[in-house]
């Protein structure tokens, strides 16, 4: 089954895919040739389907394995529109960015969209896996979660979807610690899955809640395992750029960009991007740090 989905211009699928490291995490698989990706999804109906997403003039083309009902097709379209931010409008940010040499060309490159998962649950879990560890360990933990608890793609017993909250809620902390090797994150992931599964935490409504950034951040911080850095990253995935994801990298690059390599703290990072207001997180994310990559 083939689908074609339009996007608000300017749009570049490779720019979305390269926006951060999510495409390296299962059940994503990058397609280096086209700049697209494959993704294995577990639909609410229980069906597991693979999306083959590739660039198409004005949007993306999608090849789906198997046959879907009309309702499932509508669900897939909605999920992909969310994952790729097909309707997002960055015109206001682009107008500001063209006045800053470090951001010029953002519109021409169609930057701004940040690759997301179909569910906020998956994004929160993956964000928890990025905290206080190396990227290689994050990839390992994610891969373990998917292969141990994800539903397999029919006919491909080595390819799995991301586990559902119900599936993870049925395991225990010891298993997540020792077999999945999540370490201290195990109780956070388990509690999150249990609360989403039993309905006491409604995560998905936050995607289109209409809440202001402050209230949205408050709700994210109420999730165990989510601190300031993780909340800022999740806010950007939700289209709110008011907060900066301050970590060791942010401290390093701001130090070299504006403070001659002298040590800085959160205050200096915040001050560097304060003028960007509601777009400061996006300005930081897209800033040209290329000369610092090998430092």
Image (spheres, rainbow, N blue to C red):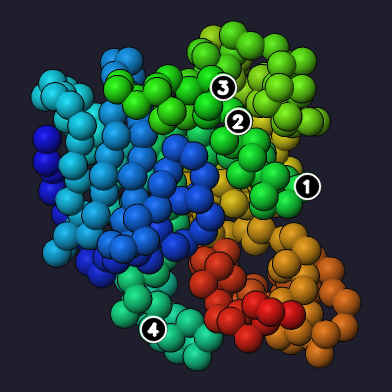
Q: CA distance from mark 4 to mark 1?
A: 33 Å
What is the total number of numbered labels drawn onto the structure image? Answer: 4
Q: CA distance from mark 2 to mark 1?
A: 18 Å
Q: Secondary structure at mark 2?
A: helix
Mark nearer the N terminus (1 vs 3): 1
Circle nearer the N terminus (2, 1): 1
The answer to whether the residues at label 4 and label 1 have Cβ atoms under 8 Å apart is: no
Left or right for 252, reference 272? right
Q: Quadrant of residue 204?
A: top left
**Circle 1 sits on which residue?**
132
Q: CA distance from mark 3 to mark 4?
A: 43 Å
Characterize the local packing of mark 4: few (<14), some (14-19) or many (20 or more) Cα atoms within 10 angstroms.
some
Disc 1, SS? loop
Figure quadrant of the N terminus:
top left
Residue found at x 22% / y 60%: 55
Q: Nearer the viewer, residue 122 or 82?
A: 122
Report which residue position mark 4 lands on. Answer: 105
Vertical placement of 30 versus 171: above or below? below
Tell me which numbered mark, 3 or 4, is placed earlier along the sequence.
4
Work out how far the residue at label 2 is from the one at label 3, CA to CA, in angstroms: 6 Å
Crowd band around label 2 with a 10 angstrom C-alpha radius: few (<14), some (14–19), many (20+):
some
Where does label 2 land, which residue? 144
Separation of residues labelled 1 and 3 (CA atoms):
23 Å
Residue at (71%, 22%) from the top-left corner? 179
Q: Which mark is residue 148?
A: 3
The C terminus, quarter of image: bottom right
Precedes in sequence: disc 2 or disc 4: 4
Label 3 SS = helix
Q: Is residue 78 left or right of residue 286?
A: left
The residues bearing labels 2 and 4 have C-alpha atoms spaced at a distance of: 39 Å
């Amino acid at each position: 089954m083939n689908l074609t989905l339009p996007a608000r211009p300017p749009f570049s699928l490779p720019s979305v895919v390269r926006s951060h490291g999510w495409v390296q995490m299962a059940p994503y698989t990058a397609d280096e040739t086209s700049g697209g990706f494959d993704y294995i999804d577990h639909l609410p109906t229980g069906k597991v389907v693979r999306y083959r997403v590739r660039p198409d003039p004005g949007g993306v083309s999608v090849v789906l394995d198997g046959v879907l009902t009309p309702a499932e097709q509508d669900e897939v379209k909605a999920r992909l529109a969310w994952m790729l931010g097909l309707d997002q409008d960055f015109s206001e940010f682009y107008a500001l960015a063209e006045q800053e040499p470090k951001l010029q060309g953002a519109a021409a490159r169609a930057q701004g969209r940040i690759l997301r998962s179909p569910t906020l649950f998956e994004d929160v879990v993956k964000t928890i896996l990025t905290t206080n560890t190396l990227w290689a360990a994050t990839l390992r933990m994610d891969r373990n979660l998917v292969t141990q608890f994800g539903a397999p793609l029919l006919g491909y017993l080595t390819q799995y979807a991301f586990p559902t909250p119900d599936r993870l809620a049925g395991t225990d902390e010891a298993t997540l610690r020792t077999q999945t090797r999540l370490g201290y994150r195990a109780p956070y992931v388990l509690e999150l899955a249990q609360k989403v599964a039993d309905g006491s935490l409604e995560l998905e409504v936050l995607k289109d809640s209409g809440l202001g950034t402050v209230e949205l951040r408050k709700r994210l911080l109420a999730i165990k395992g989510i601190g300031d850095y993780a909340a800022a990253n999740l806010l950007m995935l939700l289209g709110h750029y008011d907060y900066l994801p301050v970590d060791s990298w942010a401290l390093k690059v701001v130090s070299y960009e504006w403070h001659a390599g002298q040590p800085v703290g959160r205050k200096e990072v915040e001050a560097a991007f304060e003028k960007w207001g509601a777009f400061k997180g996006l300005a930081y994310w897209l800033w040209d740090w290329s000369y610092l990559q090998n430092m």
